[in-house]
Image (tube, rainbow, N blue to C red):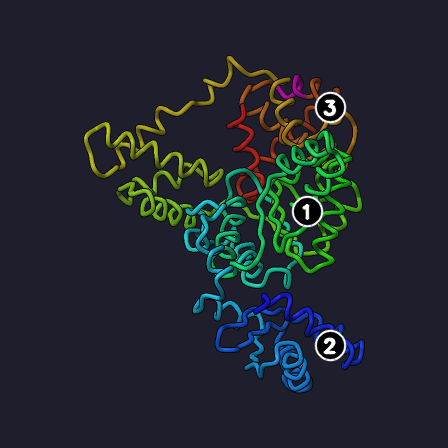
Amino acid sequence: MQDIETIWKQVLEKLELRISSVSYMLWIKTIKPLELDDKDNLILIAQSVTAKNQILRNFIDIISDCCYEVTNKNLNISVLDQNEEVEYLKNNKVNEKNTTKHEEKSPFMEKYTFDNFVVGKSNQFVYAAARTVAEHPGKKYNPLFIYGGVGLGKTHLLHAIGNYIHEFLPNLKIKYTTCEQFTNDYITSLYSPTKNKAIIEFRGKYRNLDVLLVDDIQFISNKKETQEEFFHTFNDLILNNKQVIICSDRPPKDIETLEERLRSRFSSGLIHDIQAPDIETRIAILHKKSQLEKYYAEDSAINYIAEHVNSNIRDLEGKLSEVYFLATLNGKKVATLQEAKEIFDNAPTKTEFKDDLSPEKIMNIVCDYFNISYQDIVGKKKNKEIVEPRMIAIYLISELLNLPLVNIGKIFGGRDHTTIMHARDKITDQMKSNKKTQSVVEELKKSL
């Protein structure tokens, strides 16, 4: 027997001649054939519950007739909506082709799943969006744009989406890439000896997909040709109802030199940030890490780590590893508060920064992080994209170098010491109440 895609294509050709063009485009063309088994059971997927009801009410008989004309068999036709498709795939092996694909090794990191992602107030909404996209790719929140600081779980969510689709929707073509990899693949195609063929292959690699996941899209800034190619790739996927998920360290409006049309496309779906975890979530993350890695630690040790690391999950888990490693060196099977305190007591202090730091180094690190120029940070511009980095640089210089406010004012273009004081105090206050500012400052300190 012919494969299901070929059969359904022939059925559609017959249906198009027998159904009004409006009804055909609205209800019929969007049907996806899922399975035709040896017992002549045909499973079709409608794009929504409404579409399913319309098909069953008005078109199921004519679909059955057209299927008979193509296969010369009376097929048992079932129409499922997308929620029912997920359940069906969970409980059934679809066909030999799809089963083989399902058994292939997943290209996604096994440890990054939805089950292993600790949900708290700082990430509950973005988790819900990612889960919805995984269950209904191309139907809701398309594109999905997730942004946030380093080590807060963006990559975890990308791989969780990939792992879920690979397991429960194995018939979908899915690809994870970084912005750097996309750029390198495009450049390689441009300089290939068979350029035209290489570009066609490159476009096929990124456009013949059902789901595309892109990490670190902020690095596409300043790459005009790559932005052009990504724009067309993005458009091609979205127009064909294929799911696109993008991660960045900042929202589209804050990515410097990003073309306006790309910024507009990214903003056409759902944009959501993922923030630094609160204390309760940090404790839960450490307990989950302990279970997964078999890092046995007393509650007092875990609570101590959670209280002293509030920047990002990567640092949090790293400290747990250090504490447990120290415990094993001490001949213990369970890490205690003693090891936790010892690790933090030996951490670099403020005075250890001073010999290696200068105002210029701090300002350059801040400029690199926010992708702005040195002239911007010391200049007179007052837009938010410049003012916030400037105030953070002032805060860091004041805290880490303890320079007089007058001297800091001179560094920043001759600003009055009261202006410097205001900037320092504002960031100090934000650090207490704004987890995003807190996370950014901690990341910058780590870089320094």
Marks 1 and 3: which is nearer the front? Answer: 1
Identify residue type, mark 3: Val
Residue at x-position 75% and y-position 27%: 376
Q: Amino acid at mark 2?
A: Lys
Spatial separation of the CA atoms under disc 2 and disc 3: 69 Å
Element type where label 1 sits in the image: helix
Q: Which residue is drawn at the image coordinates 68% and 68% (left, top)?
A: 9
Magenta segment boundaries in residue numbering:
404-408
Q: CA distance from mark 2 to mark 1?
A: 29 Å
Image: 193 above or below 61: above
Residue 14, numbered label: 2
Q: Is residue 77 visible?
A: yes
321 vs 22, left or right, is: left
Q: Nearer the viewer, residue 7 or 44?
A: 7
The quadrant of the rendering that contains the N terminus is bottom right
Q: Nearer the viewer, residue 292 or 118?
A: 292
Kind of residue at disc 1: Gly
For label 1, the residue is: 204
Mark before the other along the chain sequence, 2 or 1: 2
Q: Is residue 381 left or right of residue 82?
A: right
Is disc 2 in contact with disc 1, using a CB cutoff of under 8 Å? Answer: no
Q: Residue 406 in magenta?
A: yes
Image location (x, y in percent) of residue 110: 43, 47
Check disc 2: other Cα within 10 Å, few if <14, some if 14-19, many if 20+. some
Instruction: State the image coordinates of residue 118 (x, y, percent, origin top left).
Output: 43, 52
Please tell me how crowded label 3 is: few (under 14), some (14-19), or many (20+) other residues with Cα within 10 Å.
Answer: some
Residue 441 in the image: state x and y as whole percent.
56, 33
Is residue 180 left or right of 21 when viewed as pictured? left
Q: Which mark is residue 378?
A: 3
